[in-house]
Image (cartoon, helix red, strand yellow):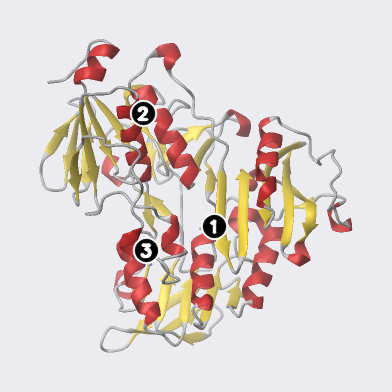
């Protein structure tokens, strides 16, 4: 029976459904129980596995150090939930407050959390994507399959896309002693996420570690033999590559298709919500019983011009899930805003890379410590005279300092003197990000304007 009374009654007898049984969904469920929710709790997930950690899949798992089934997320507490795993949500009825499932069943709710995350963008032609030897990397099962194939010592691995996932896959291949070619449509690895100045450093790292890096190149076709095994890749410059394995690392797609026709402001960029994680409908009106958290969410942030940000960040998923869960069982002045400053990290080719803020907003960059040529530095990004983001290569201890600079809208260029500042960092230069109108698979932060129902997005990975 639906509960529409007081907060106290809802906390005791309400029905909460969480669609998405991964990091954000689990942390939200734990927070609900920690804050006194004793009603019914249903967890719906399209994978058959209980929640697991994704970052190790492209790192420790591909290096053979951790099995793919050994990345389960630690539990903070028991959540006393009904788990519906291995069955996807296929629709949402806002009027009747029901979630439709792929097995034909429906689950009623009083309040709903959407935490469906993202999936790997597949190769665009199904027949080629189905070739034996073509992989994506997003799930535990993906990582297990790819790890087994890499352990079989393929002659050459092709990585299509040099964003963070593609670069980490290439790094793992080289550490395993495998020949690897990276095809990147942009002028450098990581260029969509960190810009061309830092991308040039990432390119040097790859080539110094033996990667056959080919930039401003796209893969136009994947060719198989009569048995359906991958044998060759065709490139936009007219060349071909003989390869046994191709890892498609063209970025992520937000899992919002199941919300088509629901009336929510949901589309390819995610589900729009306010700073309290409450979903918007297609008219821009905030709902009060539908909440969003994690990679699938788009929310405005006052530090970044109130633009809607879509974040593919581990820390954001946790922080937003906790805020969403708190707000689901709170009203009015007791609700909190989600104002987490974006932060991201990657380990590749022996270097620890961390960023904070929204680098793609930056139009200038200045190296504040270390040197680009040494692959060990800290750099700040500027936008309209303030520090908007920072990135470090093996300088992680400075990330918290730059977070404070971003939060306080510190001036750019920075007005402080550092002990390890080199001549190259005395003045800002253009950050050299790609034209935002062009499709890219690189950013982990996407700025998507001000409209909660914006659906305009185009991606054509097969063509230059």
Percent x, y of residue 126: 30, 69
Q: Quadrant of the C terminus?
A: bottom right
Relative to residue 204, is residue 367 drawn left or right?
right
Check disc 3 and report the residue beneath it.
122
Percent x, y of residue 145: 32, 71
Check disc 1 and report the residue beneath it.
442
Mark 3 or mark 2: which comes first in sequence?
Answer: 3
Q: In the image, is residue 111 above or below residue 332?
A: below
Disc on res. 32: none
Residue 278 visible somewhere in the drawing:
no
Q: In the image, is residue 366 above or below residue 9?
A: below
User: What's the CA distance linking mark 1 and mark 3?
Assistant: 15 Å
Is label 3 in a helix, a strand or a loop? loop
User: What's the CA distance linking mark 2 and mark 1?
Assistant: 30 Å
Mark 2 or mark 1: which comes first in sequence?
Answer: 2
Check disc 2 and report the residue beneath it.
325
Which residue is nearer to you in this view: 135 or 348? 348
Mark 3 residue crowding within 10 angstroms, few (<14) / some (14–19) / many (20+): many
Q: Residue at x 66, y 62 (%)?
A: 199
């Amino acid at each position: 029976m639906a509960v529409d009374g007081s907060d106290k009654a809802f906390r005791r007898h309400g029905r909460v459904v969480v669609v998405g049984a991964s990091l954000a969904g689990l942390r939200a469920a734990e927070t609900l129980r920690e804050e006194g929710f004793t009603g019914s709790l249903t967890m719906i997930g399209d994978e058959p596995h209980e929640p697991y950690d994704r970052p190790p899949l492209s790192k420790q798992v591909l290096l053979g150090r951790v099995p793919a089934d050994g990345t389960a997320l630690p539990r903070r507490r028991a959540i006393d939930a009904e788990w519906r795993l291995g069955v996807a949500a296929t629709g949402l009825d806002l009027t009747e407050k029901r979630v439709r499932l792929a097995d034909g069943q429906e689950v009623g709710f009083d309040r709903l959390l959407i935490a469906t995350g993202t999936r790997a963008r597949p190769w665009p032609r199904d027949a080629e994507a189905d070739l034996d030897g073509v992989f994506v990397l997003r799930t535990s099962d993906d990582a297990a399959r790819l790890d087994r194939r890499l352990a079989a010592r393929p002659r050459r691995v092709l990585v299509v896309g040099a964003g963070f996932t593609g670069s980490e896959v290439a790094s793992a291949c080289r550490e395993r002693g495998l020949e690897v070619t990276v095809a990147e449509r942009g002028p450098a690895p990581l260029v969509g996420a960190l810009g061309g100045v830092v991308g040039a450093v990432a390119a040097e790292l790859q080539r110094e570690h033996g990667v056959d890096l080919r930039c401003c190149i796209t893969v136009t076709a994947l060719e198989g033999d009569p048995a359906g095994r991958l044998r060759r890749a065709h490139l936009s410059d007219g060349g071909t590559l003989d390869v046994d394995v191709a890892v498609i690392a063209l970025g992520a797609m937000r899992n919002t298709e199941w919300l088509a026709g629901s009336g929510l402001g949901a589309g390819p960029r995610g589900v729009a919500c306010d700073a309290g994680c409450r979903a918007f409908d297609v008219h821009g009106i905030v709902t009060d019983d539908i909440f969003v958290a994690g990679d699938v969410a788009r929310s405005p942030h006052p530090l970044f011009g109130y633009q809607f940000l879509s974040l593919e960040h581990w820390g954001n998923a946790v922080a937003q899930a906790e805020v969403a869960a708190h707000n689901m069982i709170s009203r009015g002045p007791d609700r909190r805003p989600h104002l987490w400053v974006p932060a991201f990290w990657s380990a590749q080719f022996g270097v620890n890379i961390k960023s904070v803020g929204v680098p793609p907003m930056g139009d200038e960059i200045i190296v504040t410590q270390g040197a680009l040529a040494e692959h060990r530095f800290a750099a700040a990004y500027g936008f309209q005279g303030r520090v908007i983001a920072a990135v470090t290569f093996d300088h992680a201890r400075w990330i918290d300092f730059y977070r404070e600079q971003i939060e306080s809208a510190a001036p750019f260029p920075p007005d402080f003197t550092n002990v390890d500042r080199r001549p190259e960092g005395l003045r800002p230069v253009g950050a050299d990000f790609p034209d935002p109108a062009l499709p890219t698979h690189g950013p982990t932060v996407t700025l998507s304007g001000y409209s909660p129902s914006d659906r305009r997005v185009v991606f054509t990975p097969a063509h230059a």
